[in-house]
Image (cartoon, rainbow, N blue to C red):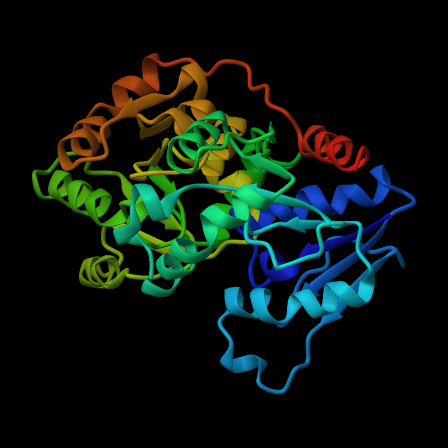
Amino acid sequence: MRIGIDGRAFQGKLSGIGRYAYELCSLLDELLPKAQFFVYTHRPIQMPGRSDRWILRHDSFPLIKHLKPIFWLKTRVPRLCKRDNLDIFIGSATFLPKLSSAVNKIAIVYDLNFKIVPETMSFYHRLAHSFFFRNDVLRADTVISISKGTSERLYKFVGRRSDAVIYPSTGKDFQIQAREAIQNILNLYKISEPYILSVGTGEPRKNLKLLIEAFLSIKNKGLLPNYKLVLVGGRGWKNKDVASLIKKDNSVHILSLGFIPNEHLPAIYSGAAFFIFPSIYEGYGMPVLEARACGTKVITTDIPELREAGGSDTVYIKPNFEGIFKSLLEMEKLNNNQNINQFTHPSWEDGARKLAELIKPM
């Protein structure tokens, strides 16, 4: 069995989509021992598999730097795939190249940002989704979504539900940490307790501007005097307002750490008094899952996809100024009275087995 994979998901520092695709694909090596994997990329990547059955196909076309990633996938990858005589292609970032009907195509759908919150996307990404999303989903032989909510929205906007839901997981390191381990990491990043934590790439959909404004308003009223707001996540896009607010604060009340290695996150989650994730829309909400796994109480937006990640032990709010402001003020009461249920959730291994079962009959 010869399996092709869109390697764009494995480029750069892995978070969200990248982590999801990487974790599942890396486990396919053991689950499909007779398969050969071809990973297509035009930029440096982290290869998910390490055996000699994983083959990197790095496109060295001279004009490659002038092609946007989606147009590279559409124009260059079909030729590369044809040479490798594939049986299956996994669209790890949803989109699919044009392939022979003999190639079984799997599309993984993470969200419907371009339908729900198009204003939070860059012009290029919005354009690419408008042109290609619907057609690629409809011509896929198998569609996987990361939540039931995403599957339902897919049916609403495209007319097709996913064939399977494979939930994200957290990895074994995401659990309640020992006090010494927490303190070591907090010292490393100069984080003082108590603190409120938020994790997410700095883009408009994550609602960081409103979170910061609500937190600073509370501070200006002399409330929550001992708390800082700690922000973790890459720079993102359309975030000038957020960057300006953080710069103006000058680390008095807000500590922005940027991207943090995965191995340090469990201690930062575990040390937080509370985790808040007021995103306008998510296809699932991996940070909510991570916080719960580390025993941290969570405030997040009341939408179906985040309820799937948050379960019954999470506080749900409207992602507006009033909802954020009120939840932050009530956090200490909630911290004393709310009990975290025992954390259970499908593992990456569960998800990879489900993916492998979908591949085997093809």
Question: How many numbered badges does the structure rendering display?
Answer: 0
Residues 239 and 342: in front is: 239
In this rendering, position of residue 255 left or right of residue 55: left
Q: Is residue 133 at all visible to an observer of this figure? A: yes
**Residue 198 in which image quadrant:** top left
Residues 359 and 15: in front is: 359
Q: Residue at x 42, y 54 (%)?
A: 129
Residue 113 rendering spot, x and y as whole percentages: 37, 45
In the picture as drawn, the residue positioned furthest to the right comes out as 34
In this rendering, position of residue 67 left or right of residue 123: right
Residue 137 rendering spot, x and y as whole percentages: 53, 44
Q: Residue at x 20, y 45 (%)?
A: 210
In the picture as drawn, the residue positioned furthest to the front comes out as 101
Q: Residue at x 55, y 31 (%)?
A: 162
In this rendering, position of residue 331 left or right of residue 341: left
Above or below residue 268? Residue 99 is below
Q: Residue at x 28, y 60 (%)?
A: 239
Q: Is residue 258 at all visible to an observer of this figure? A: no
Residue 130 rendering spot, x and y as whole percentages: 38, 54
Residues 323 and 134: in front is: 134
In the picture as drawn, the residue positioned furthest to the bottom comes out as 62
Residue 317 rendering spot, x and y as whole percentages: 25, 26
Quarter in which the C terminus is drawn: top right
